Amino acid sequence: GAGVSQSPSNKVTEKGKDVELRCDPISGHTALYWYRQSLGQGLEFLIYFQGNSAPDKSGLPSDRFSAERTGGSVSTLTIQRTQQEDSAVYLCASSLNWEQFFGPGTRLTVL
Amino acid sequence: DAKTTQPTSMDCAEGRAANLPCNHSTISGNEYVYWYRQIHSQGPQYIIHGLKNNETNEMASLIITEDRKSSTLILPHATLRDTAVYYCIVRVANRDDKIIFGKGTRLHILP
């Protein structure tokens, strides 16, 4: 069946521009997560949505980062005024009970 | 912070058993040990999890010490496709929540 999809697969932007990254979770999954992975670094939690509850934003590195999940399905991660240190692979995952299924990621490069 | 300690890297000959250790001396009574792996350029993939009894599935076996302070993931007959970063994680079981990943072990399967 269809897994978690993310778009775009690659994004190159200039410093100071805003970017939007999209995640389509597995249909029916109530939980959605965003992580990022910088070059040579481990996976870093960013934000977690669960149903209609307030999201857990404890991992967002600055107020330039925000995320929405519309209709309990698709999610968009927005990074405003991008900086070079934002360059990373942004991974989305979804789950129904506990097992998280990860998408292929969006590779963001900030020039 | 991650509650686990793993070797940075390991090598294993193809066809042999790969034994990946993990220390989790501060594990709580309601926390399980989970293993994920991340193959190059892909999102992490769930492998196995357990509480205190040894577990086996089609991918691997998980051996947890009686005091639960350490565990070993065993890939019984490693193949080149098992080359990946393996993450040992402790978390409360069977519920949705963010994953706090450590640095993991980079496993190289040698032909």
Image (spheres, coloured by chain):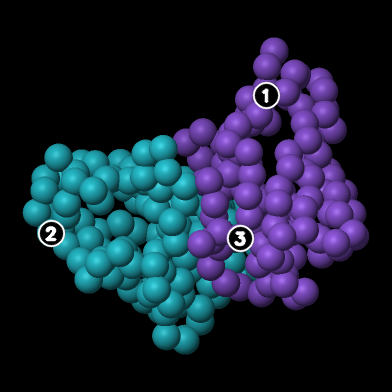
Q: Which mark is residue B3?
A: 3
Q: Among all residues in the image, which is located at the extreme top?
A: B111
Going by the numbered disc 3, the residue's amino acid type is Lys
Task: Classify mark 1: residues with Cα within 10 Å, few (<14), some (14-19) or many (20+).
Answer: few
- Which one is closest to the eye, mark 2 or mark 1? 1
Q: Is the residue A17 above or below the residue B37 in the image?
A: below
Residue identified by numbered label 2: A81
Going by the numbered disc 2, the residue's amino acid type is Arg
Q: Secondary structure at mark 2?
A: loop
Q: Which of the 4 quarters of the picture holds residue A26?
A: bottom right
Residue identified by numbered label 1: B11
Q: CA distance from mark 1 to mark 3?
A: 24 Å
**Label 2: chain?**
A
Going by the numbered disc 1, the residue's amino acid type is Asp
Q: Is residue A85 left or right of residue B25?
A: left
Q: Are marks 1 and 3 in contact (CB under 8 Å)?
A: no
Q: CA distance from mark 3 to mark 2?
A: 34 Å
Q: Position of residue A34 (x, y in %)?
A: 42, 62
Q: CA distance from mark 2 to mark 1?
A: 42 Å
Q: Secondary structure at mark 1?
A: strand
Q: Secondary structure at mark 3?
A: loop
Q: Position of residue A63 (x, y in %)?
A: 22, 71
**Label 1: chain?**
B
Q: Residue at x 85, y 49 (%)?
A: B63
Q: Among all residues in the image, which is located at the extreme bottom?
A: A53
Q: Nearer the viewer, residue A93 or B24?
A: B24
Q: Position of residue B96 (x, y in %)?
A: 61, 73
The chain drawn in purple is B
Q: Is residue A7 visible?
A: yes
Q: Are marks 2 and 1 in contact (CB under 8 Å)?
A: no
